[in-house]
Amino acid sequence: MTVPPTGPRVCVIAGGVGGARFIRGLRSHLDGTGATITVIANTGDDVWLAGLRVCPDLDSIMYTLGGANDEGRGWGRLAESERVSAELDAYGVGWPWFTLGDLDLGTHIARSSLLRDGLTLTEATRRLCARWDLGVDLLPVTDDDVETHVEILDPLDGAVRTIHFEEWWVRHRAAVPARRFVQKGIASAQATPEAITAVLHADVVLVAPSNPVVSIGTALAIPGMADAVRATAAPVVGLSPIIGGRAVRGMAEACLAAIGVEATASAVAAHYGARSGGGLLDGWLVDTVDATSASGIEELGLRVRAVPLWMTDVDTTAAMAAAALDLARHPVGDRAR
Amino acid sequence: MTVPPTGPRVCVIAGGVGGARFIRGLRSHLDGTGATITVIANTGDDVWLAGLRVCPDLDSIMYTLGGANDEGRGWGRLAESERVSAELDAYGVGWPWFTLGDLDLGTHIARSSLLRDGLTLTEATRRLCARWDLGVDLLPVTDDDVETHVEILDPLDGAVRTIHFEEWWVRHRAAVPARRFVQKGIASAQATPEAITAVLHADVVLVAPSNPVVSIGTALAIPGMADAVRATAAPVVGLSPIIGGRAVRGMAEACLAAIGVEATASAVAAHYGARSGGGLLDGWLVDTVDATSASGIEELGLRVRAVPLWMTDVDTTAAMAAAALDLARHPVGDRAR
């Protein structure tokens, strides 16, 4: 018999590398408390490459929580090699600038095989995660193929072209301005029942300090997700991925520029919006350097708190998670407590 | 403009490892003569494994002629590693007893990707071979999925079971008696136009010293192939894969036993039959140890010659190929020359 969890149910909406680090801190903070963590991961970066389904965000989270990620490089598997990719390159198959490690390819081959056997991405992810001791339930936001594409002006001929997000991000390092992002397949996609249930039945919903456009933005754009976040009885608290006007990780500024949002903690909070005003958040954690500038967004109906947000190690990140959960326990207008 | 070949067109019907070695010797013998070599390879050992199309015979030939095979082990890629397979094993995907090397997996991933892009196996094989300098045109016998399965009595419960040939060959090492072989998919399959044309337009057709049942037998069972061999104006000469009552390579005796053919050079020749009697061969090379016992099969209408048939090195194998081509130049009844 399965004993139902007795602790709070924490649901996290997250992207890849930054999301993974945050969840690792959250897991550390909640260790031994009986709390359960359900992670809803963005799948917009996913790509079929050489016939294999690559899910960068799901895998970053799985590897990081499984203790198998390359901490030095910040992504991918520890002790990785690239022998298979060199073969693909020699055969002229795949993207030469998108090198998949051998160990990582094991994950993609296994997942693709499970998908072709008829499993949903949710089921395949559970099968892959069973190998690791994650301590969280990892869910893709959707079982449908939704892929973020980027509209650019081709620097060679000035023509408008649409390329896969990974091509823009990895090959062009987001240096070619994005005109807009297009989520291919989103019209017929839907958030999974598991993801929606996790949001609706949560005691707390956290929005990880992930890319607000292509990670959190895409996850929330999947039909059903934003409605669930608006409808849940749980408080929803986000953590700013922007510190002092710069993205904590990656090239998120280029993504924000494409949608006309300033790269500040306040602008991102305003972009998400307050649930009291039809938006998505009840609370917003900013870094201490943004304390003064962010105080104005309380007028939106958001409870704001400033704490150190650099995820330098697990303990620091655990403290961030603790602050986010604490903020969630204190609803708007309950500032005195 | 392509200059048409001026030398003889040699067509070889072959299985994997033994076939590859023979073709390497043939290529060496014909080097610089202007002759062209077209290889028609068995595809009955092929298998979809973890969503990847594995073609052992095509790859054995490609690697051996490309100089990339592991000579010590006798199969697979030189300097191979098995990191990806260990991952698949950890995820519980694939066959744990069928370990695919990392470099080899590069081939399978590339091929599967090309097939999913809509290429035929013939086209995909050409694309893969373009990387190597093979000196032969390598063709699968069919573009259709035809897979050899083996009917066995399960040693655990005595029930009749049908398993993939690779499971019988690799996992059980052919130690569980085969009741019969079943070519799944053969009814709706056909030999490719390229393979049939190669046989019909050849100046010489050679049957490599490969497994007479699951390699040559399966290739010739593909609808269209045996008819082409019977119809071609070219002489057809086979090389015995049995020397002194034992198979040169592998466990071919177990395959012959399943179809009720004695493991002798003569019995295999009789199994193939003489073209003059509706069979497939005009000539048959046996090893010198089988010279006396094989002389009786000349009555079938086969021209028989005995030469050393151990493929110990390239030069020895080149001499075998020379003897086969020489036999082809001397039709039945022309013994005095």
Image (cartoon, coloured by chain):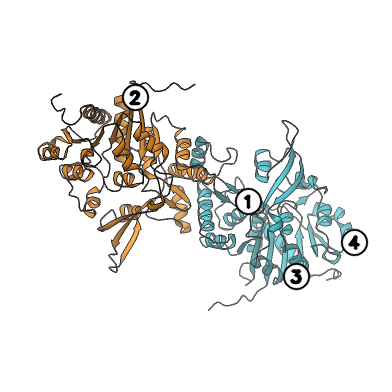
Chain colours: A cyan, B orange
Amino acid tagged 1: Asp
Q: CA distance from mark 1 to mark 4?
A: 37 Å
- In primary-sequence order, the first of circles 1 and 3 is 1
Q: Residue B281: horizontal and vertical position, in percent?
A: 24, 38
Mark 4 — residue?
Answer: A299
Locate the C terminus of chain B and report the quarter of the image it occupies: top left
Q: Are marks 4 and 3 in contact (CB under 8 Å)?
A: no
Rounded to the nearest angstrom, the CA distance separating label 1 from label 3 is 27 Å
Which residue is pictured at 34% across the width and 60% down the height? B162
Q: Are marks 3 and 2 on the same chain?
A: no
Residue B81 in the image: state x and y as whole percent.
42, 44
Q: CA distance from mark 3 to mark 2?
A: 76 Å
User: How much space separates mark 4 and mark 3, taking CA atoms?
Assistant: 22 Å
Of badges 2 and 4, the one in the foreground is: 2
Q: Which residue is mark 1?
A: A46
For discs 2 and 1, the disc positioned in front in the rendered view: 2
Give the answer, above or below, for where B111 lies relative to A274.
above
Residue at which label 3 appears: A232
